Amino acid sequence: MKKGITVIGSSGVGKTTLVRSLFEDERLKDIIDTPKRFITRDPRKGDNLIENSYVSAEELEKLQSNNDLAVAWDRVLDKTMHYAFAKPAKGKIAVYSANNAIYQYPDKVNPSGFFQETIIVGITASYEDRLQRLKDRSPDLFEKKAEQIKLRLADSADNVIPHVDHVFVNVEDVDKSKRLFCDFVYNLIKSELS
């Protein structure tokens, strides 16, 4: 049996918004857990400070050596950033929200093959929606790191499709997408994780 659900997709497809919506759903909120995500970069304007902890590479290495992490991986944009998830709460279904680096750099995932032991759901969205979400979410990236924005948007949302078990298309209507995503995940849990 699979060990949870991993939601992946290009920058700006709406992964975080969709995963957060699961905790608003009465059917799901008590059975799932989104483990804390650690990132080795400084926070940006618009970052989710509840979902993410920003740590140094040394702090992340210490968490890993203390066996406090479920998985770690690297992502290369304008520099290498390290990511990791804490272990999920016992008795809950883990829902991880990760970037496409988990399939782009599989040799950088530790333990190897971790995400393949989960149901991988790829989120897609239009280029225009992604661009607007990135502007809304990370205005400082547009001001200070235009090259990184180009790299993020060059990673087409459709690139994820060959690497996932299921695809969810995130539409412009946020409330509709959130409802549909909750139904989608609920049915996944009933059919593949029960």
Image (cartoon, helix red, strand yellow):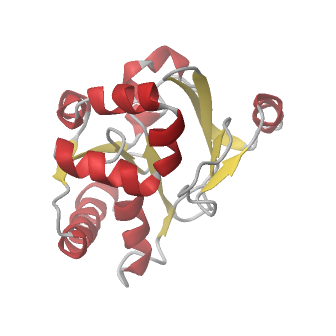
Image check: 112 left or right of 86? Answer: left
Residue 81: x and y, percent? 60, 28
Residue 63: x and y, percent? 79, 39
Image check: 48 left or right of 180? Answer: right
Image check: 9 left or right of 125? Answer: right
Q: Nearer the viewer, residue 11 or 169?
A: 11
Residue found at x 44% / y 40%: 142
Residue found at x 43% / y 31%: 146
Against 45, residue 66 (above or below) is above
Against 145, residue 20 (above or below) is below
Residue 131: x and y, percent? 28, 45
Residue found at x 38% / y 63%: 17
Q: Nearer the viewer, residue 189 or 85?
A: 85
Image check: 104 left or right of 38? Answer: left
Residue 25: x and y, percent? 36, 80
Query: Is the C terminus in the top left, top right, bottom left or bottom right quadrant?
Result: bottom left
Q: Residue furthest top?
A: 107
Residue found at x 34% / y 57%: 193
